[in-house]
Image (spheres, rainbow, N blue to C red):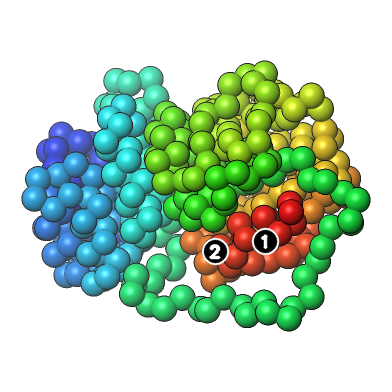
Amino acid sequence: MIRVLVVEDSPTVRQLLVAMLESDPEITVIGQAADGRDGVRQAQQLEPDLITMDVHMPGLDGLAATKEIMTLSPAPIIIVSSAANTSAVALSLDATQAGALMVLPKPEGPLDPEFEAQRAQLTAMVKAMAQVKVVRRWAPRRPAVDRQGAILPSLPANLRIRLLAIGCSTGGPAALRTLLDGFPPNFPLPIVVVQHMARSFVAGLATWLDGGSPLRVKVVESREPLRGGIVYLAPDDYHLGIGSDGRAVFSDGPPIGGFRPSVTHLFASVAQSFGAASLAVIMTGMGNDGVAGLAELKAAGGYVLAQDEATSVVYGMAQEAVRAGLTDLVLPLDAIAPRIVELVR
């Protein structure tokens, strides 16, 4: 049985979340808190398997509460927030940097046509995220490998990379912000990204990343020509591909492995259009989306980097790529951008 603490200041939403969660026989709600301070207290007393956290609350907001919980009594945290409120989205994404695992939309109510899908998504994510092992935020990370003097794979001297493609899922927003911060403002390549994200949050993610990156970040538009130094996020509910003319191509084809957009679709498209001139990065995330696409990219001569286990929130997608023998180099998160800059140079 998965024991959940619900932290939400609205009594109506709180009751709705409790009912949605307890509709699953594997989940029980062991506590309810109406503000962040009480949420922190109950997290210490009850030691739940998972916490759902609102962001805008009186007194201690969800960001501050997440920081305290991850310091005092760490537990997996899912942020439940309104995608229509720009400040709520920004605060929610800040909470992922503080240790929250993911962001889900607030349910609208049983009469909403999306309610059953939201209930299924919430319970599925609670069961999946409750298994994630979290640590106190002051705990030292395993130090990055000393790469001085190491022989690193390099590209053929006559090869010029034309595109960087990135795939990530759970833990991805915070990891992307760290990664993008490592690029110089004059980075010459277009960067295309598929980040598994709850519907309606991708525009807020683009704004949030843009505010913390030396590069421009935007949601890509259909048939938009891709330009160097710009980060393009896949839109809601469309697969993102790249044509040989360097333009974004959308597809409403069936989900791949349950995902649309799919990382595999992106990587396979880049392999077809750019071949050996493509560079891919697979990062933190649950499952194996992207691995089949990386197989095509590697067969076409592309180069692949993966985020390591120590810096991944969930070592799933990257691990599966490593197990399949599809990666050229596995690096800590803060070492990926510098290595890419070396390769491009």
User: Mark 2–mark 1 contact, CB under 8 Å?
Assistant: no
Q: Is residue 78 left or right of residue 133?
A: left
The quadrant of the rendering that contains the N terminus is: bottom left
Q: Residue at x 41, y 35 (%)?
A: 207
Total count of labels: 2
Specify the farthest residue to the front. Answer: 186
Q: Residue at x 67, y 42 (%)?
A: 188
Q: Is residue 318 left or right of residue 304?
A: left
Q: Is residue 225 left or right of residue 314?
A: right
* Percent x, y of residue 308: 61, 67
Q: Is residue 151 left or right of residue 148?
A: right
Q: Which mark is residue 339?
A: 1
* Percent x, y of residue 65: 21, 57
The picture quadrant where one finds residue 161 is: top right
Q: Is residue 218 above or below residue 328?
A: above
Q: Residue at x 78, y 62 (%)?
A: 328
C-alpha span from label 2 to label 1? 10 Å
Q: Is residue 259 above or below residue 2?
A: above
Few, some or many residues within 10 Å of mark 1 (<14, 14–19, 20+): some
Q: Earlier in the sequence, mark 2 or mark 1?
A: 2
Few, some or many residues within 10 Å of mark 2 (<14, 14–19, 20+): some
The picture quadrant where one finds residue 332 is: bottom right
Specify the farthest residue to the left. Answer: 59
Q: Amino acid at mark 1?
A: Arg
> Disc 2 marks which residue?
334
Q: Residue at x 19, y 69 (%)?
A: 44
Q: Which mark is residue 12?
A: none
* Percent x, y of residue 107: 30, 32
Q: Amino acid at mark 2?
A: Asp
Q: Secondary structure at mark 1?
A: helix
The picture quadrant where one finds residue 121 is: top left
Q: Secondary structure at mark 2?
A: helix
